Amino acid sequence: MRLLTLAFIATIQLSIAAGEYQIKKDVLYRDGSPQLDDYQRERCLLDIYHPPTRGFATIVWFHGGGLTSGEKSFPKGLQNRGHAIVAVNYRLSPKVKVTESLDDAAASVAWVMAHIEEFGGDRKRIFVSGHSAGGYLTSMIGLDPSWLGRHQADANDIAGLIPYSGHAITHFTARKERGIDANRPIIDELAPLFHVRKNAPPILLITGDREKELLGRYEENAYLFRMLKVSGHKDVTLFELDGYGHGMTDPAHPLLLDFVKRIERRNPLIKPK
């Protein structure tokens, strides 16, 4: 009976703590662009979930969906952990090219860098993550500095990159735009592998089981991991989640949270609260 009572109290406490978080929805992250079209006003929006404290870390989260579908949401496994989550929508193919989806991703992260302190967050504690297509966007804007550079922001100011099961080669939707078969691998300027560099932010690569993943998603990330190592990158880790397929987000979330804590402990410029 005592155990049940304690469990009940713990549940109430967790609920109260979760209730302290604030949510601001549908923020236009291209707020400085007066010439937006209707589709940009529809899709270039983000939601912010943040604690009532100050100096917290922020996880920018890009949804999956092959760059053709999907909607912003706050992953349950990342909620109520003392940090903010910024859930981002971006424009989708075939209405736009993959390059425009990438530019939206970069614009949203630049917006967070410029504005998160207004909500109490620490600008030096911004992590970027996402699943599948969201993982691809994460890797691309973190490894190729030109995307954030277009928005007067620096990719090296990102505290860490955590792509979940993202393409490391050129995305299949970008290949489709060019009439290239989805099973034909390409590495060009739209591939994270093309932009391997030793001074990129710390990186945690997570995939599902290589025998259960989409196509060669594990092997792509394993190659990205190896080439980052070869380039001289000092902080890159690869996790393969045995027994899990492409939808491996729930078991990946604790790995992300541990990564965030480790980066905060290691970096003297980042002060955990």
Image: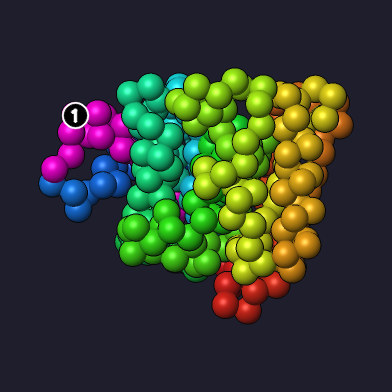
Q: Using the image as rendered, state which of residue 171 and residue 56 is in the foreground.
A: 171
Q: Is residue 47 magenta?
A: yes
Report x, y in % for residue 217. Answer: 72, 32
On screen, residue 49 above or below 171: below
Residue positioned most to the front: 179
Q: Place residue 52 in its image quadrant.
A: bottom left
Say which element carries label 1.
helix
| Residue count near mark 1 (Cα–Cα under 10 Å), binned few <14, some 14–19, many ≥20 | few
Disc 1 marks which amino acid?
Asp
Q: Magenta residues, as a range? A: 35-54
Q: Using the image as rendered, state which of residue 78 and residue 200 is in the foreground.
A: 200
Residue positioned most to the left: 34
Residue 7 visible in rendering: no
Report x, y in % for residue 47. Answer: 38, 40
Report x, y in % for residue 40. Answer: 25, 34
Image check: 253 left or right of 128? right
